[in-house]
Image: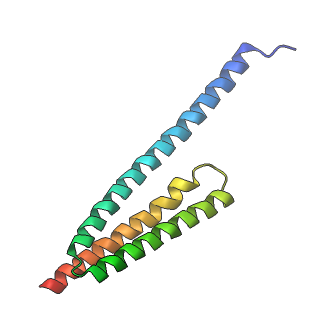
Amino acid sequence: MKTPFSKILFVGAFLVTFACGWVCHASQAGKAMAEADANLNTLYKKLISTVQTSAQKEKLKITQRAWVAWVEAEVAFQEELLTDGKAGLFARLEPTEARAKQFEELLQRTEDFKR
């Protein structure tokens, strides 16, 4: 039995629409992640430039490396748990934004302390 062309066309259009929606969503998440990562890097550079001693700088570097390791472990866990292919971006975005907020608060506190 032959499948009518209209059914094939409908299914094809549905699949293309679904794929475009997923790609657009992933693209938006990728853009948000790139912006959050750039913001975090900028804040890290500002923060490390305000740190006064080499011991403090080393502690900041150690904590940042530990944070990165934690995020990577969390992403790996979520990718294992959630098989939708989007876990990596979404698992990174929230902690990256939260870390940026921590850096902003630390920068503000160091500015307040200097006054």
Above or below for 31 versus 98: above
Locate residue 11, reporting x and y percent: 69, 26
Residue drawn 40% across and 69% down?
98
Relative to 51, is 75 on the left or the right? right
Residue drawn 39% across and 51% down?
34
Taking depth in this image into account, of 62 and 74 the one nearest to the observer is 62
Locate residue 13, reporting x and y percent: 62, 25
Taking depth in this image into account, of 107 and 52 the one nearest to the observer is 52
Residue sitting at the far right:
1
Locate residue 79, reporting x and y percent: 63, 57
The quadrant in which residue 99 appears is: bottom left
Residue drawn 71% across and 20% down?
8
Locate residue 4, reporting x and y percent: 76, 14
Taking depth in this image into account, of 61 and 77 the one nearest to the observer is 61
Relative to 2, is 57 on the left or the right? left
**Which quadrant is home to the C terminus?**
bottom left
